[in-house]
Amino acid sequence: MSRVVHFEIQADDVERAKTFYSAVFDWSFQDYGQFMSTPYWGVVTGPDDAPGINGGLLRRSAPAPSGGQGANGFVCTVEVGDYDETEQRILDAGGQVAMPKTALTGMAWQGYYVDPEGNTFGIHQPDPGAA
C-alpha cells in the first residue's frame, strides 16, 4: 500500500503564500532551493514525531484556474483543533470560503477554502457530536 508522504502548493507570489500559511496554521518554511536547483521552500507542518506530512512551496508554472472553476490539483485537508477559530484566521489572512462548514454527521466538521494564490484546501475538526 502506498501513502502520501509530501504535498506541494503552487503560488504566483511565494512570499504572500508563506505569510498566509504561517498566519493560519503556524507552518514554517525552509529554503530548499540549493537541493532543487530552483526556488523551492520546504513546508514544515509540525514536529517529526507527530502525525502528518511536510510539503513544498514553489512558484506556479502555469496560470491558476479562474474563480468558480473546480480545483485542478490534489486538494489537501488540514486537521484543526477549533474549526471556527481557524476559519477566522483564514479569512483574516486573506482566504475565502469555497464550501462552508458542513457537519459530517457523528464524525467531524469539514469545509473548503481558497488561499490568496487561488489554491483550494480543506479544514477538518474531528467531533463525534457534529450534526
Image (tube, rainbow, N blue to C red):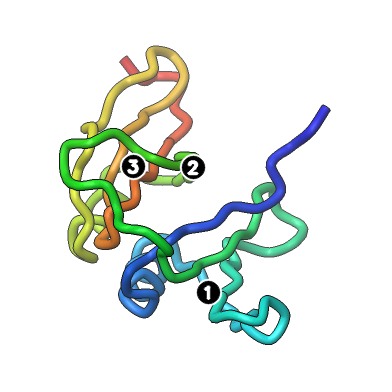
Which image quarter is the N terminus in? top right
Local SS, label 1: strand
| Circle 3 crowding by C-alpha within 10 Å: few under 14, some 14–19, many from 20 | some
| Circle 1 crowding by C-alpha within 10 Å: few under 14, some 14–19, many from 20 | some
Local SS, label 2: loop
Local SS, label 3: helix
Residue identifier under label 3:
83
Q: How many marks?
A: 3
Question: In which image quadrant can residue 70 be found?
Answer: top left
Residue at horizontal 32%, vertical 74%? 13
Q: Residue furthest bottom?
A: 34
Three-letter code, disc 2: Cys
Q: Is the residue 109 above or below the residue 38 in the image?
A: above
Q: Is the residue 74 above or below the residue 7 in the image?
A: above
Q: Residue furthest right?
A: 1
Which image quarter is the C terminus in? top left
Q: Earlier in the sequence, mark 1 or mark 2?
A: 1
Q: Which mark is residue 28?
A: 1
- Along the line of sight, which residue is nearer the eye, 80 or 65? 65
